Image (spheres, rainbow, N blue to C red):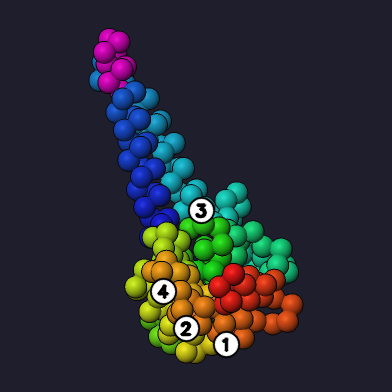
Amino acid sequence: MWTSVIVLLIGAALAGASAFWVLRAYRRAGGGAASARPALAAAAAVILAGLVVYLLIGRPELPGAAYAQRLEALKGRDPTTFTADEALAVLSQAAREHPDDPLPHLYQGQVLLRIGRAEEAARAFDSALRRQPELPEALMGLGRAMVAIEGAVSPEALALFQQAAERSDDPAPWIYQAMAAMEQNRDTDARRLWREALARMAADDPRREMARSMSEGE
């Protein structure tokens, strides 16, 4: 909602600035204020019409068609066929319809993180945690987003991975803890943490060989 409002305000400001520059050029060329009024009125009408059309059918996530119609069409499709923007639009509506549910925010964070929008992902994961403070996937997601933003496993991210590890059998929190130990040259701790991650990996997990090698210090 606020994104749309900001887009509208920026658009209105740019349109007004454009009209100002046109009028100034017109007057410098010798045109009088009275003769400029019809042109300005026409410009204002076009700007207003554009804003009204945007309010009626515009939506940044789903450009080019009425938002409500496109959203209804999306609901009849296989979610695995969604683009990132389509998934975010559906999840945004779900979050509005179920304000206490952490899952739409969790899934938004996962989509945003996957497409490289780490700061927005962090805010989505934080929203999920405000609704369910011990949700392990959100703890893990927020930690991963922080690593993506900072380029390293910070103490804050490490604390999130530790909390996630206490609440989940997912090997990923242990992998990030092992990475943090390696960054700090705590080799003994790193090998132990890699072993913890390896113990939680499925037999066909492609990370098993790496975890095994790291746990043995190879």
Residue at horizontal 41 percent and vertical 69 percent from the top: 185
Above or below for 27 versus 181: above
Marks 2 and 4 sit apart, C-alpha to C-alpha, by 21 Å
In front of the other: 10 or 143: 143
Q: Judge depth for marks 2 and 3 and give the one in front.
A: 2
Dots 4, 3 in contact, CB < 8 A: no
Looking at the image, is mark 2 or mark 4 earlier in the sequence? 2
Badge 4 local density, few (<14 within 10 Å), some, or many (20+)?
Answer: few
Residue at horizontal 43 percent and vertical 82 percent from the top: 162
Q: Judge depth for marks 4 and 1 and give the one in front.
A: 4
Residue at horizontal 46 percent and vertical 42 percent from the top: 50
Q: Which residue is mark 3?
A: 60
Badge 3 local density, few (<14 within 10 Å), some, or many (20+)?
Answer: few
Badge 1 local density, few (<14 within 10 Å), some, or many (20+)?
Answer: some
Q: Which residue is mark 1?
A: 169
Residue at horizontal 29 percent and vertical 28 percent from the top: 20
Marks 4 and 1 sit apart, C-alpha to C-alpha, by 23 Å
Q: Is residue 26 magenta?
A: yes
Image quadrant holding the C terminus, namely bottom right
At label 1, the amino acid type is Asp
Looking at the image, is mark 4 or mark 1 earlier in the sequence? 1
In front of the other: 80 or 185: 185
Which secondary structure type mostly characterizes the magenta part of the structure? helix
Marks 4 and 3 sit apart, C-alpha to C-alpha, by 47 Å
Expressed as whole percent of the image width and height from the top left, the position of residue 145 reads 45, 66
On the picture, is 36 further left or further right than 191? left
Q: Which residue is mark 4?
A: 186
Q: Is residue 124 visible?
A: no
Q: Is residue 184 magenta?
A: no
Which segment is the magenta one? 23-31
